[in-house]
Image (cartoon, rainbow, N blue to C red):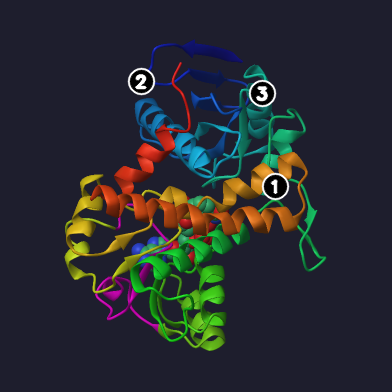
Amino acid sequence: MEIVEKNNISEHEQVVFCHDPASGLKAIVAIHNTSRGAALGGCRMWSYASEDEALQDVLRLSRGMTYKSAMAGLDLGGGKSVIIGNPHTDKNEQLLHAMGRFLNHLQGNYIAAEDSGTSVADLKIMAEESPYVSGITEKPSLSGELRNGDPSPSTAFGTFQGLRAAVKYQLQRDDLKGLRIAVQGLGNVGYRLAEHLAKAGARLWVCDIDRQQVKTAVEKLGATAVSPGEIFSQQVDIFAPCALGAVLNDRSIPQLKAKIVAGAANNQLAEERHGQMLQQHGILYAPDYVINAGGIIDIACERQGLNDQHLNQRLTGIYQTLLDLFARAAHEEQPTNIIANQMAEDRFSVH
Ligand code: NAD
């Protein structure tokens, strides 16, 4: 296994490249900032077109984790890893074991978690080699059943709390009864969010490219099905993006009739300036990495051995964090994404 460390890349503390010819592993770990604690972040597997594309992705994603954990008030830094390869055809036990051994090289400065292209099962294989893996422990939920390390239920619950905060701030309402909400994407997080919203009395308009998911939401949650192309222009109070990144852009924002954007998807703004565009349209935007921090909060609680009661308290904290953020953004007449970045930067230091 060949391991090469490169210093002075971007604003990152450590960037390490690994090539293991025996297993075919090609991976990069980027540690952005550890001033609050060890860098925790997902291990993504993707068919990157080049090593440079993988590097740019891991640098961007690890930086994002520093901001996310800081805003969630966690004693964790920001890091991420990427495995270069097709998760459907290139993944095997040998490669995952090699990734585990690569993690050991970082000596706990970086802790891996599940991400796109990797599953809890994959992380468990890495954990056979390395203690620096998280989100793999079975734990009792409040209802008493065991649940695996999948953080999606926590992400959905945290997003629900954040959406409630946006409603409180923008619409001066404590409940969601009768509010019209468009949910884009009904996957692990989006469907669970839709369940919370339906239970709270909201009326749902939903879309997904997976028709079965839409059918289930229509049948079980009384949602109205909408085609993916029409989700932005629905006559709703809230738009909840829970599918892809970059959905808030020059084309979609002018279509929005919602007064709030609050959803779980990562990297919702195509560019930072779109936060200002939303503000100019009178739309309150709940910054993605603040509202969707439930997953990292879940993993942090697991690492600290905290039970579900503590976890729920911390997830509910997203409500107050967002209320504070909205108030400061209004006071300073700045877009919410800019204020989120400033609040996060106040919470970590740069060496
Ligand atoms: P997922 O893959 O389970 O769900 C995504 C869903 O979006 C799928 O059902 C997919 O069919 C659908 N979709 C894809 N393209 C679409 C389109 N054009 N229009 C409508 N639907 C489309 O993923 P997930 O775990 O539910 O995550 C959803 C989003 O939340 C992602 O952006 C993810 O990065 C982010 N996120 C997830 C977590 C977590 O804990 N899972 C944590 C933080 C952020």
Disc 2 vs disc 3: Cβ atoms closer than 8 Å?
A: no
Q: Residue at x 77, y 52 (%)?
A: 307
Q: Residue at x 74, y 40 (%)?
A: 304
Rate crowding at label 2 as few (under 14), some (14 to 19) or many (20 or more) other CA atoms within 10 Å: few
Q: Residues within 10 Å of mark 3 (few under 14, many from 20)?
A: some
Q: Secondary structure at mark 2?
A: loop
The residue tagged 3 is 108
Task: Tell me if residue 307 comes above or below residue 282 in the rendering.
Answer: above
Q: Mark 2 or 3 closer to N-term?
A: 2
Q: Is residue 133 magenta?
A: no
Q: Position of residue 204 (x, y in %)?
A: 43, 81
Q: Is residue 117 visible?
A: yes
Query: Could you tell me the amino acid type at mark 3?
Result: Gly
Q: What residue would you read off at disc 2? A: 10
Lower sequence index among marks 3 and 1: 3
Mark 1–mark 2 CB contact (< 8 Å): no
Residues 70 and 112: in front is: 70
Amino acid residing under circle 2: Ser
Q: How many marks?
A: 3
Q: In the image, is residue 170 above or below residue 22?
A: below
Q: Nearer the viewer, mark 3 or mark 1?
A: 3
Is 244 colored magenta in this rendering? Answer: yes
Residue span colored magenta = 225-247
Tag in front: 1 or 2: 2
Residue tagged 1: 121
